[in-house]
Image (cartoon, rainbow, N blue to C red):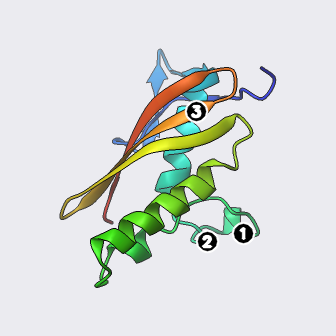
Amino acid sequence: EGLLMKTYLFDFDKGDFVVRDGKLIECDGVEAIKVWIEKIIRTEKNRFPIYDGTEYGCHIEDLVIGNNYTAEFVEAELKREIEDALMQHPMIQRISGFVLERSINAITVTLEVHMYGAGTNTVTVTVKNQ
């Protein structure tokens, strides 16, 4: 239980924290892990100096923008990138049920996240091309 962190709810569509009555809304447990998952998937690895020297983030843009890779290769690499990133969290036991949907301007990843002491949770993240 000590590994379940607290964080603040973040509205990824608006790009800002969720505020109610002038205060940031806290979340913990599974909801905090879901926020962490979405943030790490949406953060391009090695782009931001604050994460230098860490393994934080995923290489997604190189795989989906301006290349001629096969769909099978892209899906396999995205799955590997995302699983490697998510397995850094001490509460995540394993990932399964990886489904990738691509559109012209976004990718949507849906996966089952198996967490120690918190069961299995479905997480869906959409990353839009910048």
Q: Residues within 10 Å of mark 2 (few under 14, many from 20)?
A: some
Residue name at image x 32 percent, y 76 percent: 65
Left or right, 106 with respect to 74, comes to left
Left or right, 125 with respect to 92, comes to left
The Cα atoms of the two marked residues, 2 and 3, are separated by 27 Å
**Compared to 96, does 30 lie above or below?**
above
- Earlier in the chain: of badge 1 and badge 2, it is 2
Instruction: Give the label, 2 or 3, closer to the camera.
Output: 3
Secondary structure under badge 1? loop
The answer to whether marks 1 and 2 mark residues whose Cβ atoms lie closer than 8 Å is yes
Q: Residues within 10 Å of mark 1 (few under 14, many from 20)?
A: few
Instruction: Assign the C terminus to one quadrant of the image.
Output: bottom left
**Compared to 49, does 114 lie above or below?**
above
The amino acid type, in three-letter code, at marker 1 is Asp
Q: Residue furthest left?
A: 104
The answer to whether marks 2 and 3 mark residues whose Cβ atoms lie closer than 8 Å is no
Q: Position of residue 33 (x, y in %)?
A: 60, 33
Secondary structure under badge 3? strand
The amino acid type, in three-letter code, at marker 2 is Asn
Q: Residue furthest right?
A: 2
| Residue indicated by mark 3 | 114
The amino acid type, in three-letter code, at marker 3 is His
| Residue indicated by mark 1 | 52
| Residue indicated by mark 2 | 46
Residue name at image x 60 percent, y 67 percent: 48
